[in-house]
Image: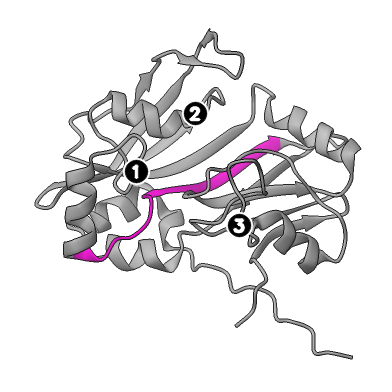
Amino acid sequence: MSDALPVLLEEEHFVIVAKPAGMPVHRSFHVRVRDVALQRVRNQMKRRVNPVHRLDQPTSGCLIFAYGKRWTARLHSSLRHESSTKTYLAFVRGCWPHDDPITVDTPMKGDDGEMKEALSVVECLGRSDEPRCSLLRVTPRTGRFHQVRRHVRDMHHPVIGDSSHGDTRINRWWRENHGFQRLGLHCLAMDLPHPTEERRIEVICPIPDELRALWQTMPWWEDALAAEPRLALPFPDPPEEEPPA
């Protein structure tokens, strides 16, 4: 089995890969495991790479690595541009009560400990009473720590599988009754201005197989497909390993 991560987009100065759930982006004081996305991509691309942004360890989806410090800074700046968007899919507890998109604006502490503005636009793609769950499309307009997870929790609909901000009893029910072992959060798409050209960088990470296998059994699946056709895209295969010389 290949250890390579699926490549969603590669250009001269960067690569965007599909990070699996449970894999840290890089090692840190709190993350001592050897298998991290940074090292995987370095080995795969056979060159040094730098992560451009954060993606929580239990979250899957789009992850950008730059080739060199200059392009790391350029792409980080592009991600902070007001026109940039990240689109997340959040599989949450309960039947979402809102028909129209809503903006959640609960402030959050920044890295400096001060309260910061935090905005997320939340839309319902599908919902059911049995089982009581919903699929939400969340577009954060700011980039606070665990913002999507905390904002849907603030609306009393925590992400299923969230051990930090979720419902332990509900998480256990989904594990025992549906074998759902991961966080129900996925970074589906990113759209940002190219740092040096008059065009945009647009990338989609289709949902991984373990999410599709469960979501296809939910009563709301057809509604979700109609509202978000990108759910139907197949997950890409990792690149084949080169045979030894």
Residue 245: x and y, percent?
89, 91
Q: Is residue 34 left or right of residue 135?
A: right
Neighbor class of circle 1 (other Cα within 10 Å; few <14, some 14-19, many 20+) is many
Q: Going from the N terminus, do you reach mark 3 or mark 2 first? A: 3
Q: Nearer the viewer, mark 2 or mark 1?
A: 1
Residue that appears at 37% across and 56% down: 182
Q: Going from the N terminus, do you reach mark 1 or mark 3 first? A: 3
Identity of the residue furthest to the top in this view? 114
The residue tagged 3 is 33
Q: Which residues are magenta?
A: 178-192
Identity of the residue furthest to the left in this view? 130
The residue tagged 2 is 140
What amino acid does circle 1 point to?
A: Asp
Q: Going from the N terminus, do you reach mark 2 or mark 1 first? A: 2
Q: Is residue 75 left or right of residue 62?
A: right
Dot 3 falls on a residue whose secondary structure is loop
Q: Is residue 158 left or right of residue 210?
A: left
Which disc is residue 162 wearing? 1
Neighbor class of circle 2 (other Cα within 10 Å; few <14, some 14-19, many 20+) is many
Question: What is the spatial separation of the Cα atoms under label 3 and label 2, in whole angstroms?
Answer: 29 Å
**Of the pair 140 and 221, the residue shown nearer to us:** 140
Residue 92: x and y, percent?
27, 42
Neighbor class of circle 3 (other Cα within 10 Å; few <14, some 14-19, many 20+) is few
Residue 35: x and y, percent?
63, 62
Which disc is residue 129 wearing? none
Question: What is the spatial separation of the Cα atoms under label 1 and label 3, in whole angstroms?
Answer: 20 Å
